[in-house]
Amino acid sequence: MSLPFFEQFNAVTPLAYFGSLVQEDDGFPLLEAAIACGQDEYPDLDVQVVLGEVDQLVARLRRRCTSESDPLQRLRTLNQFFFLDLGFGGNVNNYYDPDNSFLNVVIRTRRGIPISLAILWLELAGSVGLKAKGVNFPGHFMVKVNLPNGQVVIDPFTGQSLSREDLSERLEPYKRRTGLVDDFDIPVGLYLQAAQPREVLARLLRNLKEIHKAQEDWQRLIPVQDRLVMLHPDAWSEYRDRGLAWAEMGDAAQAVIDLQIYMDQATDALDRDAIGQRLLELRRTPS
């Protein structure tokens, strides 16, 4: 039975709802948008209910912070509450489980990956007045807090505070892999720039993307690509990757649309010849 007209009119798809959240950078609702990413996997997910659960955590944390608490005391209280009392931490036993990226599940299981744990931690940090930001550190998302006497960098996977020496050690494999050594070395501080909320959300989605791609789960990959395209409409490689996923799904028509956008826009791309050849093959596919 179809919905009454007024309900059809008011119905909003999960993707359209997500799009309404990520239109503007000003006031970007990172937590709400991150929770909404779970609606593809959990169609009955009520984002407002999950936001309410976070509000309850905020209220509990605020009761522990007095008006006399200085920023360092508030940070210690937050970490005690988040990592020890609530037991949030990294899912070391099943790191690549997609559920680690869905905040509705992370709140229930208290297990996640650095980016999902960071999003929750940042929300709590902001609620008690801490100047906290996410950091797109290579290979492992971090959070940082500016205190009167300096900056603290924390691994949201473990709750550990990291020194400059710790961070330099973690950077070494990345630097060697990318050739950023000797004359091309970059100071640690440049890796600690604050990540904008849009980039934090993109990293969350790209983690999911890599998991689905590695498992060749094209059906789950395409909704993630839809959100990445909506989040970064000028990221032409996301159209390419969605087109290739459509091709794997056997939908040549959808694949051609996305791959043609990529060819039209990414005029300097190194893989234009390969994608162009794939596009020709798809155009010859019987409909």
Image (tube, rainbow, N blue to C red):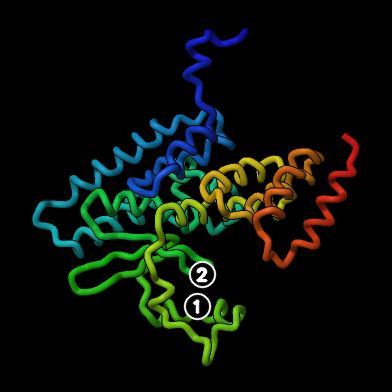
Left or right: 171 in relation to 68: right
Label of residue 146 in the image: none
Number of residue marks: 2
- What residue does disc 1 label? 171
Which residue occupies the foreground of this view, 62 or 27? 27
Q: Which image quarter is the C terminus in?
A: top right
Q: Residue furthest bottom?
A: 182
Q: Earlier in the sequence, mark 1 or mark 2?
A: 2
Assign a secondary structure to mark 2. loop
Q: Is residue 190 above or below residue 3?
A: below
Tell me what residue is drawn at x 40 percent, y 45 percent.
24
Which residue occupies the foreground of this view, 187 or 26? 26
Residue 57 showing in the rendered view: yes
Question: Residue 103 location in percent, x, y?
Answer: 46, 44
Tell me what residue is drawn at x 84 percent, y 56 percent.
277
Q: Residue furthest left?
A: 68
- What residue does disc 2 label? 138
